[in-house]
Image (tube, rainbow, N blue to C red):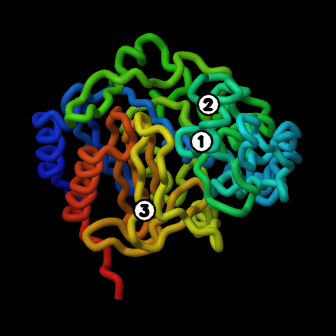
Amino acid sequence: MAFNGSAIVALLDSAVSKGALHGVAAVVVDRNGQLFHHAAGEAGERTLFRNASMTKAVATTAALQLVEQGRLSLDATVESILPEFGELSVLDGFDGDKPILRPPASKATVRQLMTHSAGLGYFFLNDKLLRYHALTGEPNPLSGLKRSLSVPMVNDPGTAWEYGVNTDWLGLVVEKLSGQSLGSYLRQFIYGPLGMNDSTFAPGAEQRERLLRVMQRQADGKLAPSPHDLPPTSEWDAAGHGSYGTAQDYGRFVQAWLNDGAGILNPATVQMALQDHLSPIQLPTLLKSAMPELSNDVPALPVPQSWGLGFHLTLADLPGMRSNGTGDWAGVFNSYYWIDRTKGIGGILMTQVLPFFDMPVVETLVGFEMAVYEQVGAAVPAA
């Protein structure tokens, strides 16, 4: 496909020149490889980004490989593999300043970890959990301390979609069953086979020099250096947020999913993972932030959507944009991707700006996606 990226180049360059972004990279891929790449501002050809929650899809792919091999069952309880998971309580609320804890009403499964319905939360999106951390002094996952994963659940497993440390626990499942650290497993079975040579949980000195700095959106709309970052070291390879890589590396991962899992998964697994595994549980219409410095409130698009194994799913054709069945997600530093298997196209847009769901970035993202589909033919309108 001859791909003309001039509209995207203009869009990204303009976002930087007017001060909306300090650095940004975009990649477009089809089933055969990269169609387009452009970096603007402080981002260059070889810039490294904090993938943050874009790590989740890669770690879930590792778990799906173990499912294919018959070493892991989607409906196995998490505690049957990791007994320490069975020790987690549910946080029901507070009696004054004392947390009210009780045993969960059901046992969480591997599938529920993959769909964020295992009952686990994130401190920056859940007021109850944020208060628990404040009262107990327990570390949060951005501390790099592994015991941060052992704070209580916020719901009973299987009762609600709640964004949280689910994928971190899934990464520990992969480590337990493979006998390797997650980073070592990914190098051997995903990063290596796909040529994602700059992807890692532990960037070296040379890679850190290529890492785009994190900027914080100020009240006046300008950007200033952010006090928030991933910890310089971590006690575990955080499957939920801990990897780094280039936009091109992530493009290779998206390409593999477009191309029936080429090299890393079987076509049937790819198809299965991008089905709705969450229903009858509904996604919330608003993802409410408990820490405005890390994330804005994120309203859901008013279209049918759900969650597959490791991916958010759009379940409708969006005019001039992605197709029904497209998988996507994002990272807290405002990096985004989508995988449209119907059209055979995927996009990655990466910045390093807080808080998440920053309006100037979201506007750039929407413009990027529309420019991509202008080139490849818009999604078929709904009948």
Q: Which residue is mark 2?
A: 141
Q: Is residue 194 visible?
A: no
**Rendered residue at 38%/63% (across/down):** 344
Query: Could you say which is closer to the camera, residue 138 or residue 334?
Result: 138
Which element carries disc 3, helix, strand or loop?
loop
Task: Report which quarter residue 138 is drawn in.
Answer: top right
Left/right placement of residue 38 relative to residue 339 reads: left
Task: Say which quadrant the N terminus sits in.
Answer: bottom left
Check disc 1 and give the amino acid type. Tyr
Which element carries disc 2, helix, strand or loop?
helix
C-alpha distance separating marks 3 and 2: 25 Å
Residue 371 spot, x, y in % from top left: 20, 58
Residue 257 spot, x, y in % from top left: 50, 55
Left/right placement of residue 259 relative to residue 168 reads: left
C-alpha distance separating marks 1 and 2: 8 Å
Query: Could you say which is closer to the camera, residue 93 or residue 359?
Result: 93
Marks 1 and 2 in Cβ contact (< 8 Å): yes
Residue 339 spot, x, y in % from top left: 43, 58
Tell me the crowding category of disc 3: few under 14, some 14 to 19, or many 20 or more residues within 10 angstroms, Cα based: few
Left/right placement of residue 308 relative to residue 326 reads: right
Check disc 3 and give the amino acid type. Ala
Query: Could you say which is closer to the camera, residue 235 or residue 243?
Result: 235
Residue 229, compared with residue 271, is above or below; it is: above
C-alpha distance separating marks 1 and 3: 18 Å
**Rendered residue at 65%/31% (across/down):** 133
Check disc 2 and give the amino acid type. Pro
Q: Which residue is mark 3?
A: 300
